[in-house]
Amino acid sequence: MRFYALLLTAFFSASQVFSAHVPTIVFVAGEFEYHSKETLPAFAKRLGADYNVNTIVLERPDDEKVQSIPGLEKLEQADLVVIMLRRMVLPEEQLNRFKKYLDAGKPLLGLRTASHSFENWKEFDAQVLGGNYQNHHGNKFKTVVSVIPEERRNPILRGVSGFVSDGSLYKNTPLQPGSVPLLRGTIEGAPPEPVAWTHEYHGGRIFYSSLGHPNDFKNESFQNLVHNAMEWALKQPLEKREKK
């Protein structure tokens, strides 16, 4: 009997592995200040090489006057969307693709300028991200990032420690009700500001961080932060690819 029990255990374990859903993560790069058309594709490529995920990268055309992102129909395939957009006036049909995705209760990660993604949906920051973007402090100040002590055991902060970001500190105080700050940023002569938090929109898990300077993507803590936030948003760990 013990042999059959072990055999059944092995069978069901194997079935769970083979039936595990491979998530599709869509990255959308649409700003020109922080080189998201370089950092997001590189992050997606590394993620797809190391983990069993499908990655799709959508990019705004190089002409800054073009208010369009080709390929947004790919959002229909997405289990998770990661955005770094800035002050776009998307055509209604394209903007509605984002709204349809979010209205379905699907998760989203917003980075840096995502707080002011849409000029024709300015409520996005407060409603979806749970933020309160009010511009930023001067670029001459680097931001000292630290973990909020009460949240140090949060799984999104696994492998995340304090570091210095070259990006200016965004003003977001106070956050919207229901937002949970995870990291704070400080500069000399100003009160601290939340720089990473979670929120919920129509039942979907939302993560936002005002970090996202090109040098942040080189920082292990920031890389861990984004990776952990993806797993949290998807409600599943990302499975490592087997090395051939």
Image (spheres, helix red, strand yellow):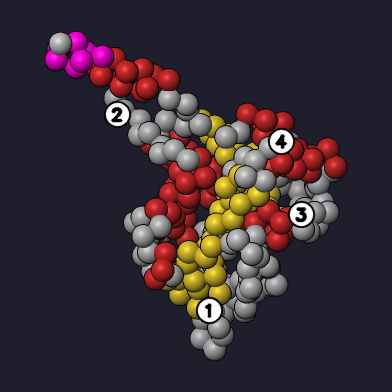
Residue 136 location in percent, x, y? 65, 74
103 lies above or below 145: above
Q: Is residue 207 magenta?
A: no
Disc 3 to disc 2, C-alpha distance: 41 Å
Q: Are marks 3 and 2 in contact (CB under 8 Å)?
A: no
Residue 83 location in percent, x, y? 62, 48
Q: Nearer the viewer, residue 180 or 109?
A: 180
Disc 2 to disc 1, C-alpha distance: 43 Å
Q: Which residues are magenta?
A: 2-8
User: Left or right of 125: which side holds 21?
Assistant: left
Q: Nearer the viewer, mark 2 or mark 1?
A: 1
Q: Quadrant of residue 208?
A: bottom right
From where the camera sits, is residue 38 visible?
A: no
Q: Residues within 10 Å of mark 4 (few under 14, many from 20)?
A: some
Q: Residues within 10 Å of mark 3 (few under 14, many from 20)?
A: some
Disc 1 to disc 3, C-alpha distance: 26 Å
- Name the residue carrying label 2: 243
Q: Nearer the viewer, residue 65 or 173?
A: 173
- Name the residue carrying label 1: 192
Q: Quadrant of residue 49?
A: top left
- Name the residue carrying label 4: 72
**N-terminal label among 2 and 1:** 1
Residue at image position (83%, 54%) is: 120
Q: Amino acid at mark 1?
A: Pro
- Name the residue carrying label 3: 118
Q: Nearer the viewer, mark 3 or mark 2?
A: 3
Residue at image position (80%, 54%) is: 121
**N-terminal label among 1 and 3:** 3
**N-terminal label among 3 and 2:** 3
110 lies above or below 3: below
